[in-house]
Amino acid sequence: MPIAGALTQTSDYGMRPDPFDGTPDMHRGIDFACTNAVTPIQSVDNGQVVEVERSNSGYGNNVLVKHEEGLYSHYAHLYTISVQNGEMIQKGSEVGKCGSTGNSTGPHLHFEVMTKNQYRSDVDPAPYLGL
Ligand SMILES: [Zn+2]
């Protein structure tokens, strides 16, 4: 799991009203509640960091990790980032702290899984997390 302990899902994968303007919007990940600047966000499996981006828009501060061939996990809206691009990390390694950077209405983790293209989430992460 990307957060240790009991998890609260605040938004599922799928169509939902856009949190800003209410228009129908495809939510390409799962949101988990967490505490700003405090909750550690951890890698769900062994892998290599293939993208680190610091941004005030979109995904905000975010980290992309490559696992086995054709499988990626993506961690968005981080307060701070704890890894470097190219770094090999272990399951449970801290990738950053929970935040609300970018297109976000409050502290949460937006978590995505990609199976084909590392720039486009294409699957529901729930089965990969055993949810
Ligand atoms: Zn989200």
Image: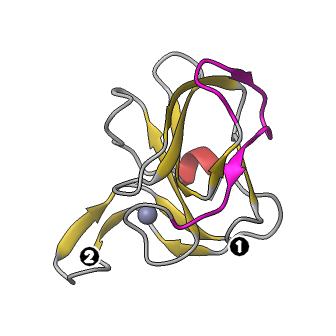
Query: For the residue with label 1, is its CB less than 8 Å from the closest atom of ligand 1?
Result: no
How far across and down, in percent of the image, does residue 111 sit?
52, 53
How far across and down, in percent of the image, does residue 84 sit?
64, 27
Label 1 vs label 2, nearer the camera: 1
How far across and down, in percent of the image, does residue 28 sit?
36, 55
**Is residue 77 positioned above or below 65 on the image?**
below
| Residue 35: mark | 1
Residue 17, visible in the rendered structure: yes
Label 1 or label 2, whichever comes before in sequence order: 2
Identified by mark 2, the residue type is: Asp
Q: Which span is picked out in magenta?
A: 83-100
The residue shown at (39%, 45%) is 123
How far across and down, in percent of the image, does residue 59 sit?
41, 53
Q: Quadrant of ligand 1?
A: bottom left
**Nearest the eye: 110 or 6:** 110
**Nearest the eye: 36 or 22:** 36
Crowd tier of the residue under label 2, counting other residues whose Cα lies within 10 Å: few below 14, some 14–19, many 20 or above: few
Magenta segment's dominant SS is: loop
Q: Report whether 106 appears left or right of 18.
A: right
Image quadrant where residue 36 sits: bottom right
Q: CA distance from mark 1 to mark 2?
A: 22 Å
Identified by mark 1, the residue type is: Thr
**Is residue 70 positioned above or below 2 on the image?**
above
- The residue under label 2 is 18
Crowd tier of the residue under label 1, counting other residues whose Cα lies within 10 Å: few below 14, some 14–19, many 20 or above: some
